């Protein structure tokens, strides 16, 4: 009924509203009568050949117009998902965003989809991200651990090597090449936690983390910049450290352990309906972007 009511106001009459909607004038009149009866009120008065909304009619118009437009948008999205405007929300570390976010934005711009891509994470606690995904606050997450719930899918996107980093002129940089010296330096610690431990502490496996942590930071890029201007040390993804090695005069060192230290990066999401072509397209683009990463 409301679409007839809105049309009569905007088209300034029953006949014009009927033409705009592609229905008969009697269909419009009948629906206006039903609304009058429902609200037990007169929503229009006649001025010549024009119907003029009463004060209550105008108030109702302003109240229901946004809701009707939203319902119309959602209905169109179900009919033709590829052409509907869509906000895709996700959760990810800001440092992981560097691996895919701008590339994905460029692909969206060049596509037929009208998508707004939003990272809604407000912290680096992956356990809370899983809760947000389950509560449907996000469409997918990119994290260092898979989700073990029925109805969800995980894909390993990448295993990224972790390296220790110091400035190129750090007089103690050589200590990073042996296990004893590695624990004898002053570190900037990455605050992101995995399985309730600092992410890089979890990589040490059975070793006790005796690093002297003098500063904590939730950004690898900030850590790399601070390291470049001090005698401090940090650990970072090889990709990020390599990107800024020359510009910040950094020295990169593999962790001095027998086993190679790597961080897994997973894409996790609810099982996607075949009708949701927009989300399926986004997820495939994320997978494709990560598939192109190759390191020496």
Image (spheres, rainbow, N blue to C red):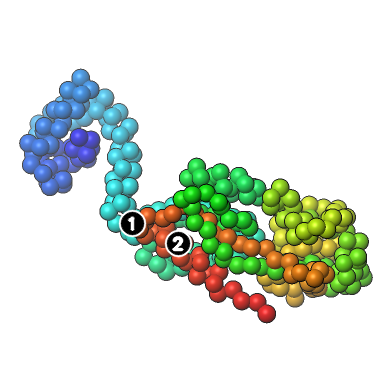
Whether the residues at callouts 1 and 2 have beta carbons within 8 Å, the answer is no
- The residue carrying mark 2 is 282
**Residue 260 locus on image (x, y percent):** 74, 70
Q: Is 37 on the left-hand or right-hand side of 235?
A: left
- The residue carrying mark 1 is 275
Q: Quadrant of the C terminus?
A: bottom right
**Residue 195 locus on image (x, y percent):** 69, 50
User: Residue at 10% across / 44% down in the picture?
Assistant: 23
User: Residue at 18% across / 25% down in the picture?
Assistant: 36
Furthest residue toward top:
40
Eyeballing the image, is 288 above or below 64? below
User: Residue at 32% across / 59% down in the picture?
Assistant: 83
User: Residue at 73% across / 66% down in the picture?
Assistant: 261
For numbered disc 2, what is the local secondary structure? Answer: helix
Q: Is residue 164 visible?
A: yes
**Residue 222 locus on image (x, y percent):** 74, 59
Mark-to-mark CA distance, 1 and 2 = 14 Å
Q: Is 104 on the left-hand or right-hand side of 203?
A: left
Q: How many circles with numbers are drawn on the protein?
A: 2
- For residue 132, which quarter of the picture? top right
Q: Is residue 139 visible?
A: no
Q: Is 148 on the left-hand or right-hand side of 55?
A: right
Between 144 and 213, the residue placed more toward the observer is 144
């Amino acid at each position: 009924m409301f679409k007839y009511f809105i049309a009569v106001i905007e088209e300034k009459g029953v006949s014009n509203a009927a033409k705009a909607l592609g229905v008969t004038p009697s269909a419009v009149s009948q629906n206006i009568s039903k609304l009058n009866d429902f609200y037990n009120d007169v929503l229009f008065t006649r001025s010549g050949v024009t119907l003029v909304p009463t004060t209550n009619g105008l108030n109702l118009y302003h109240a229901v117009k946004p809701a009707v437009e939203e319902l119309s948008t959602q209905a169109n999205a179900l009919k033709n998902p590829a052409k509907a405007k869509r906000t895709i929300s996700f959760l990810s570390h800001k440092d992981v965003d560097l691996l895919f976010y701008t590339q994905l934005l460029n692909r969206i711009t060049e596509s037929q989809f009208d998508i707004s891509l939003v990272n809604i994470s407000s912290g680096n606690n992956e356990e809370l991200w899983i809760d947000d995904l389950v509560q449907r606050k996000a469409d997918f997450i990119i994290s260092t651990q898979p989700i073990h719930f029925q109805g969800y899918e995980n894909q390993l996107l990448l295993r990224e090597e972790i390296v220790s980093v110091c400035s190129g002129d750090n007089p103690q940089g050589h200590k990073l090449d042996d296990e004893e010296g590695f624990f004898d330096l002053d570190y900037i610690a990455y605050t992101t936690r995995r399985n309730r431990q600092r992410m890089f502490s979890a990589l040490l496996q059975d070793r006790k983390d005796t690093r002297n942590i003098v500063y904590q930071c939730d950004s690898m890029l900030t850590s790399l910049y601070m390291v470049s201007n001090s005698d401090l040390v940090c650990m970072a993804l090889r990709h990020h450290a390599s990107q800024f090695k020359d510009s910040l005069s950094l020295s990169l060192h593999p962790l001095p352990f027998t086993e190679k230290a790597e961080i897994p990066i997973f894409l996790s999401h609810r099982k996607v309906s075949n009708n949701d072509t927009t989300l399926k397209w986004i997820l495939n683009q994320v997978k494709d972007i990560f598939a192109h990463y190759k390191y020496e």
